[in-house]
Structures are given as C-alpha cells and as structure tokens.
C-alpha cells in the first residue's frame, strides 16, 4: 500500500495547539485501519515531541513516532491556513506531516524523515502543497517525492545523493566503472561493516549528540556496528586506536574542526555538516558503504587519501554552509573568527587575572596598578627580562602579566585573519592578519578587525578567482594573492577606512566608560535577555561575541566596563540550565522522565557556562521555557552590571569564580536569576490543565 491516501489528507487542519492538531491527523490513520490504538500512538508521538520539538524552519511541522499501534509506514498531511505553533523558532507551521511507522519498522521511519526533509527544502514542493485544491492532488505531489526504497542489497544508493556535498573527501567513480562499482556496493552491503564517526557543533550539545545517535541508529538499522566520538561542548572521549585501525570507513558530521584528524588517514571518509548527521543518517551510512566498495575495488585510493590527509590542507577548517543566505554566511564568517580568537582571550585573560591576584598579595591594594608597569622593554626595575627573580612573588606576577598581555595583543589580528580565512580559505590569512594588526596599531580595535577581516577575505577570494596564464598559477598562492590582497586591504584601511572606524571605536569606548546607573542596568538587561533567548543560537552568540570582543578593548585596565559586560554575559548564560535543573528537582512531577534525567546533567552544564544544557527543555516546551529563560537571564545580567562584578576569562563558569571581581555579588545575581526563572517555569507548567497526561508520560 502507498504511504499516503486521499483519506490521509486534511486541507483545513485546525487545533488549539500542536497536540490537538496531531490528534486530528492521527484519527485519519484510525479511519484507514493503519492505527489500532489512537491513545497509544498519540502517547508515542507526545513522548517524541517532549524529547525535541519537530517544527522546521519555513512553516513546517513533522511530528513522528514508531509505535506498536501502527500497522504499516504511513503519512498524514495537514494544511493549517492560520498556522499552528510546532516549536520552530521562525513561527507557526502551515504544512504538517504526521509520520507513523510500526515499532519494528525503523528502516522505513528513517527513510521517510530525510526524504521529507529534503523535499520540504524545495520551494516548488511546498508551493504545490500550499496551492493544492484536492486531496488526490496532494497524494500525487507527495508520492512523487517520498517513496520507500527497495532493500539496500538490491538497490544501491544513487551516485548523485551526496556527490555535491561540500568538503566530502572522495572521488566519484568514472562512467566506465559504474557497473563494477554498483556490483561492489551490493557486495559490501551484504557484510557487516565497522564504522566510526565524529560529531561536533560549536555551541549546541544537543546537535552533537543527536547527530551521534542518528548515525549509530542508522548503522545499526543497516546491520553495521558504529562507534561515534562526540566532540561537543562537554569534551570528548577519543576513539581507541585499535578501533580506528579496524574501521572500514569514517563519517564526519561536524561544524568544528575534527580534533587530531590525522588519526583517520587512509580510511574512506564521508565529511558533512552536523545537521546531515541528524536528518540523513541512513544516506550517510549508505554513502560509506559505497566508498568501502570503491576502495576495495581500487586500493590506490587509500594511499591517495592518506597523502592528502597528511598534507598542508588537513589542519585549519571552516564549516561555512554552501548555498546559505548572505546574512547567514556573514554570521558564520564572523563566528569563525571569534572561535579562533577565544583561546587567545582565555589564555590572556586568565593569565592577567592571576597576575593581579598575585600582585595584590605581594604589593598590597596597589598591586594591580603597580604590576602593569612591567614589560619586556620597560626601564629599570620594571624590565622583566633583566630583573626576573624566581624567589619573588612580584616577579612571577609580572611574568604572568607580560605573557597575558602578549596573548591579548593577538586578539584583533587573529579575529581578522580567521574571518578572512572563512571567506577565502588560506589565501585570506595574510590580508586578514596583517590588516588586523594594522587595525590594532591604529586603535581601531575589535570593529577594525571585523572590517579588515571581511575586506581581506573578499579581496583574497576575488584575486583567487583571476584567470591567469598557466605559468603564473604556481606562484598565485604564495606571491600574487597575499601581495595583492594585503596591499589592497591594508592600503584601503590606512587611507580610507581606518580613521572613521577608530572614531567609532573611541566613541563606543567613551560611552561604555561613562556608563553607570540606569544605563548599565539596561545594557545588562538586554545582554542577559539575549543570552537566554536561544541558548547557544545566533542571538546568544551575538551577545557573547560582543562581550569577548570587548575584552580586547579592555586590555590590562583593571576596572574597564568591558569586564563587567563579560561577567554579565557569562552569568546570564548560566541561568537557564541551572534553573531547569532546580525546577526538575523541586517539582519533578511537572516533567517527563527524559527531562528529569536531563535536569541532573544540567547542574554540571550550568555551572560550567554551557547554556545548551537547557535546549532539551526548550525544544519540548519552547514558549514557556524560552519566556522564562529570557526573564531570568535578564534579571541576572542587570544585577551583575548593577553590582559591578568583573571578569577577564571568557568562559569557565563557576570554576573561574576566584578570578571574578566582587564574586560574592556575582553569585547573588546568578542565584536571583535562577530562582526567578525556576519560579516562572513552575508556575507556567502548573497551569497546564493536562497534568494527568504529563504525569502519565513521566512514568514511561
């Protein structure tokens, strides 16, 4: 039977919320005999929704579940003219697909999800569904795009499935080899493979582990074994060398550079972004199967891959999505620069903070002021190279200060260099880093680094695209591109852009320096709300980038307002996971069993300044959790600014409390925000009239 019939189409879907709408859709499955127990199936769908909301950008909802109440893989389509909130950040869903699979039908379930996701990315597909006038027309549109595949052993994946994926490290077979490749692929799928993988995401723990679970489930469904190394915000446990050596293929689903990537040299490798690991696990596993077959047929590919992985291009990486919109690409360029800058901020900030602590012990209350006089070229007793005494606490404080200051000196050049790198790859490093150094020298600071990074990257990419004579191509990367791009970027900045950007930077610093009272509280309120809004998403990262960038402008000043901003941002980012941990502790009956387990982990994540610890809760109940998070985080941000707490470290959470100025008041502000958010969450969830359903799901 087909996945969808005319009886499984609702062209005027309505409902008070997504659960009511899901019931309407599920009733169609009962009517067609594909669902034997409506309440059991709805409970399975609800349980899945509690794990993570199934709304997609662009007005899409895809509730789904495997259930013992379902007799065969099925789709139900609903079109909601007024839209229904399905948990997506960009608004309500107007096109909804309910995906139902038998409890043992994991393969069918996992086939439908990626197929639907890919189809729903096509504008003409969504437009056709929106314009359809009859149920039969919807059935035809959907059936053309979403069909279950034949068994893997008899129908190998189409070559074009991932041929265009950026960053994939393999070579497609030539036309004459197509027949032998297909035969080899079928052979490979008849035996169990040993697969290994790496998943990572720059901010979201959820994406890292969801991708790992998706890959593991897909491998298991295909009859293979798989070990995944999760390189998320909570750290990683490396795959043992013996398992890597025994592996048949590797799957990278990552948005961060793979740590120690040389370990995987010589293995067939599928390399995609982390989102592909979540939505397209079966297709990635199928691609790995095909690569194993190709490499077994042509052993020279292993040697070529090992040489490429060991070459100069295997180090620095930037995961900028191909085909993304302009605004998205600009954000990804900027965040690439920030991600490479943060280690310099962390090292420099912590060393300077430790220096000030030792100086106050050695020199008293004026120690932090006195220690800044030391340097590599300072006169007399302040020259640390000539007067270092290993038995003197002051000398050690001065040494820490000088090293920390040197690290801070790289902030703007590194930021600029890796923004340019994200745009133009390696050719962008020279104009970006040189331009950033000039921007720092001119006093244009963080804003100057942003400009030189963008200009340098765009110029380098433009020069790289020149159509030059064959004899010149060899010197383009090492002579022409760096020479021309650096000259244009730096020359333009010195003569045209530098002075107005310096004036803007000076104005911003003057405003921050003069900020006090109500203005400081309002700024803390805004930054705190941004940190609590999307929990590691774009808005959160804008606030974090503003704070870490400000550390560069703060330099070695002990009471700079930028240090207060950093403290406010970090405290606000700790509120949501800690509040959800507290809420699940004081009112466990308001939460499902998975949420209570997530609450236990959220204590450590919150104390470590990992905002993503609250994502599972926000995904299951976005309106109430995000609203509560914004209020609680805003309270904490405002109080930190009011209390004047300061911080030089860009990360670390509770573990860097000794480096926080006015740390007791910092803790008071954090506790206040956590209590406010906890109270709001408990109050809002207690008003849920369907508490019996919540309690029932909590015992599953």
Image (tube, helix red, strand yellow):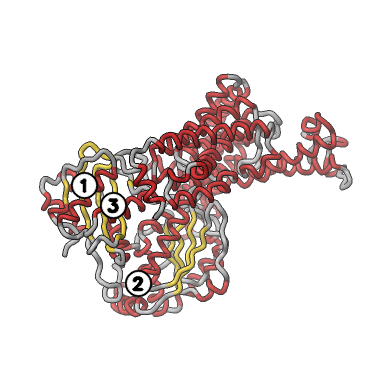
Work out whether 402 lies above or below 148: above
Q: Which residue carries the number 3 mark?
A: 42
What whole-number distance in Å separates the C-alpha atoms at marks 3 and 2?
46 Å
Report which quarter residue 73 is drawn in: bottom left
Q: Earlier in the sequence, mark 3 or mark 2?
A: 3
Q: Position of residue 52 (x, y in %)?
A: 39, 49
Could you tell which of marks 2 and 1 lies nearer the N-terminus?
Answer: 1
161 vs 439, left or right, is: left
Camera-nearest label, 3 or 2: 3
Task: Say whether residue 227 is visible.
Answer: yes
When asked about the image quadrant of residue 67, the answer is bottom left
The residue that mark 1 highlights is 24
- Callout 3: SS: helix
On the image, the x and y values in percent for residue 132 come to: 14, 46
Residue in the picture at 35% in, 49% down = 49
Q: Does residue 97 appear left or right of residue 595 in this picture? A: left
Q: Residue at x 20, y 38 (%)?
A: 81
**Circle 1 crowding by C-alpha within 10 Å: few under 14, some 14–19, many from 20:** some
Distance, label 2 to label 1, CA atoms, is: 48 Å
Q: Which residue is mark 2?
A: 173
Badge nearest the viewer, 2 or 1: 1
Could you classify mark 2 by the number of other residues whose Cα lies within 10 Å: few (under 14), some (14-19), or many (20 or more)?
some
Q: Is residue 622 above or below residue 4?
A: above
**Residue drawn at 84 percent across, 33 percent down:** 363
Secondary structure state at the residue bearing disc 2: loop
Q: Is residue 463 found left or right of 440 in the rendered image?
A: left
């Amino acid at each position: 039977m087909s996945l969808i019939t005319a009886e499984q189409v609702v062209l005027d879907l309505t409902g008070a919320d997504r659960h009511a709408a899901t019931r309407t859709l599920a009733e169609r499955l009962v009517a067609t005999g594909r669902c034997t127990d409506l309440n059991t199936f709805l409970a399975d769908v609800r349980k899945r929704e509690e794990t993570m909301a199934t709304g997609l950008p662009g007005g899409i909802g895809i509730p789904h579940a495997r259930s013992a109440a379902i007799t065969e893989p099925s789709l139900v389509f609903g079109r909601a003219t007024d839209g229904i909130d399905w948990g997506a950040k960009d608004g309500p869903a107007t096109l909804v697909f309910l995906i139902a699979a038998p409890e043992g039908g994991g393969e069918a379930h996992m086939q439908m999800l990626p197929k639907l996701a890919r189809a729903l990315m096509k504008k003409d597909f969504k437009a056709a569904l929106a314009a359809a006038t009859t149920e039969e027309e919807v059935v035809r549109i959907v059936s053309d795009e979403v069909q279950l595949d034949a068994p893997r052993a008899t129908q190998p994946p189409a070559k074009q499935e991932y041929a265009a994926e950026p960053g994939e490290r393999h070579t497609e077979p030539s036309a004459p080899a197509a027949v032998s490749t297909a035969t080899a692929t079928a052979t490979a799928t008849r035996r169990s493979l040993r697969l290994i993988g790496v998943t990572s995401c720059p901010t979201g723990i959820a994406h890292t582990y969801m991708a790992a679970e998706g890959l593991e489930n897909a491998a298991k469904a295909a009859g293979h074994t798989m070990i995944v190394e999760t390189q998320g915000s909570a750290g990683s446990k490396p795959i043992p060398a013996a398992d890597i050596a025994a592996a048949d293929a590797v799957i990278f689903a990552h948005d961060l550079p793979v740590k120690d990537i040389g370990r995987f040299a010589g293995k067939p490798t599928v390399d995609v972004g982390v989102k592909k690991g979540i939505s397209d696990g079966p297709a990635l596993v199928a691609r790995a199967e095909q690569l194993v077959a190709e490499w077994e047929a042509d052993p020279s590919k292993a040697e070529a891959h090992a040489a490429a992985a060991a070459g100069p291009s295997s180090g620095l990486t930037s995961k900028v999505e191909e085909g993304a919109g302009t605004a998205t690409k600009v954000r990804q360029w900027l965040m690439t620069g920030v991600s490479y800058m943060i280690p310099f901020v962390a090292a420099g900030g912590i060393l300077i903070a430790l220096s000030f602590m030792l100086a106050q012990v050695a020199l008293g209350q004026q120690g932090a002021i006195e220690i800044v006089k030391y340097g590599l070229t300072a006169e007399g007793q302040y020259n640390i190279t000539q007067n270092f005494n290993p038995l003197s606490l002051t000398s050690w404080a001065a040494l820490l200060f000088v090293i920390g200051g040197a690290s801070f000196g790289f902030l703007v050049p590194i930021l600029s260099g890796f923004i340019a790198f994200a745009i133009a790859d390696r050719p962008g490093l020279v104009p970006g880093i040189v331009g950033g150094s000039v921007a720092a020298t001119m006093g244009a600071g963080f804003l100057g680094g942003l400009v030189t990074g963008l200009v340098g990257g765009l110029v380098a990419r433009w020069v790289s695209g020149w159509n030059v004579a064959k004899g010149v191509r060899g010197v383009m990367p090492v002579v022409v591109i760096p020479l021309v791009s650096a000259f244009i970027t730096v020359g333009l900045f010195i003569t045209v852009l530098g002075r107005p950007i310096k004036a803007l930077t000076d104005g911003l610093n003057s405003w921050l320096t003069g900020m006090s009272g109500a203005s400081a509280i309002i700024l803390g309120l805004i930054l705190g709300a941004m940190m609590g809004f999307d929990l590691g998403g774009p808005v959160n990262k804008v606030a974090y980038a503003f704070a870490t960038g400000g550390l560069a402008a703060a330099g070695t000043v002990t009471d700079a307002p930028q240090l207060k901003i950093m403290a406010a941002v970090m405290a606000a980012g700790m509120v949501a996971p800690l509040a959800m941990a507290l809420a699940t502790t004081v009112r466990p009956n308001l939460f499902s069993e998975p949420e209570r387990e997530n609450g236990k982990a959220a204590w450590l994540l919150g104390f470590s300044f990992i905002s993503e610890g609250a994502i599972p809760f926000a995904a299951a109940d976005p309106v109430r959790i995000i609203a509560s998070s914004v209020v609680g985080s805003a309270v904490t941000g405002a109080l930190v600014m009011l209390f004047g707490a300061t911080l030089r470290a860009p990360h670390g959470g509770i573990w860097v409390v000794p480096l926080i100025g006015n740390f007791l008041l910092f803790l008071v502000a954090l506790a206040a925000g956590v209590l406010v958010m906890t109270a709001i969450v408990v109050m809002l969830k207690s008003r849920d009239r369907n508490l019996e359903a919540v309690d029932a799901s909590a015992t599953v």
